Image (tube, rainbow, N blue to C red):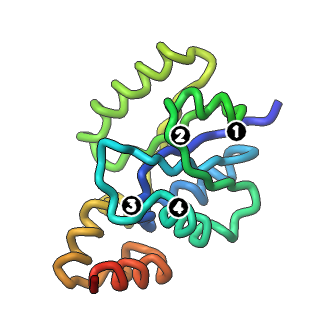
């Protein structure tokens, strides 16, 4: 039986923390589906297709990774992808309460799909997409937090 993990997120933008987690997950699972959420409740800086393209570009060096957008219920998407694991990242203790609530709801909706948590490498533990966007919007240098291609995309969109 192959183990397929779905790693969902908005990835607006994809950060080095996301990349670290996916690179490590690619060694643990037969396949990792990076699921870029449409997430209508948020107003992303980049549209869904752009985020999918950025994530694909950053993770293109990994052979067992698939990147795609989704807009349905996560457990339904996981079933479509034949995934048996939902992978989530935990940066800080304050993430745990929210992530535990999501994991419990997902288990209630799909008892056959397990949620697993990975923590980031220490050098990535403080990086978040929200902070990266804020730094970029205020003219700061984000190059140590994101892939060079993403830093370029952020600089282009911030000049508009």
Q: Residue at x 49, y 30 (%)?
A: 73
Mark 4 or mark 3: name the one nearer the start of the chain. Answer: 3
Residue 140 on image: x %, y %: 22, 83
**From the viewer's perspective, is residue 3 above or below residue 15?**
above
Residue under circle 4?
A: 49
Disc 2 on helix, strand or loop?
strand
Q: Are marks 3 and 1 in contact (CB under 8 Å)?
A: no
Percent across and percent down for residue 144 are 37, 79
Mark 2 sits on what residue? 87
Query: Tag 1 or tag 3, which sits nearer the N-term?
Result: 1
The residue located at (28%, 80%) in the rendering is 158
Of circles 4 and 1, which is in front?
4
Callout 4–callout 2 Cβ contact below 8 Å: no
Cα gap from disc 3 to disc 1, whole angstroms = 24 Å
Helix, strand or loop at label 4? It is helix
From the image, tell me which residue sits under label 1: 4
The answer for how far apart the CA atoms under marks 2 and 1 are is 10 Å
Q: Closer to the observer: label 2 or label 3?
A: 3
Sooner in the amino-acid sequence: mark 2 or mark 1: 1
User: For the residues carrying marks 4 and 2, which lies nearer the camera in this image?
Assistant: 4
Q: Which residue sits at x=28%, y=30%?
A: 97
């Amino acid at each position: 039986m192959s183990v397929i993990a779905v790693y969902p997120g908005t990835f607006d933008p994809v950060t080095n923390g996301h990349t670290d987690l996916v690179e490590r997950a690619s060694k643990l699972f037969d396949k990792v589906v990076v699921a870029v959420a449409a997430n209508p409740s948020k107003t992303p800086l980049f549209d869904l297709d752009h985020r999918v393209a950025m994530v694909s570009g950053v993770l293109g060096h990994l052979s067992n990774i698939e990147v795609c957008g989704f807009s349905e219920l996560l457990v339904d998407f996981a079933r479509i992808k034949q995934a048996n694991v939902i992978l989530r990242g935990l940066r800080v203790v304050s993430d745990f309460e929210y992530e535990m609530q999501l994991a419990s709801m997902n288990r209630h909706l799909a008892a056959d799909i397990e949620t697993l948590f990975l923590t980031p490498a220490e050098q990535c533990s403080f990086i978040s997409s929200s902070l990266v966007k804020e730094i970029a919007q205020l003219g700061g240098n984000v190059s140590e937090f994101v892939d060079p291609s993403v830093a370029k995309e952020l600089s282009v969109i911030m000049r508009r």
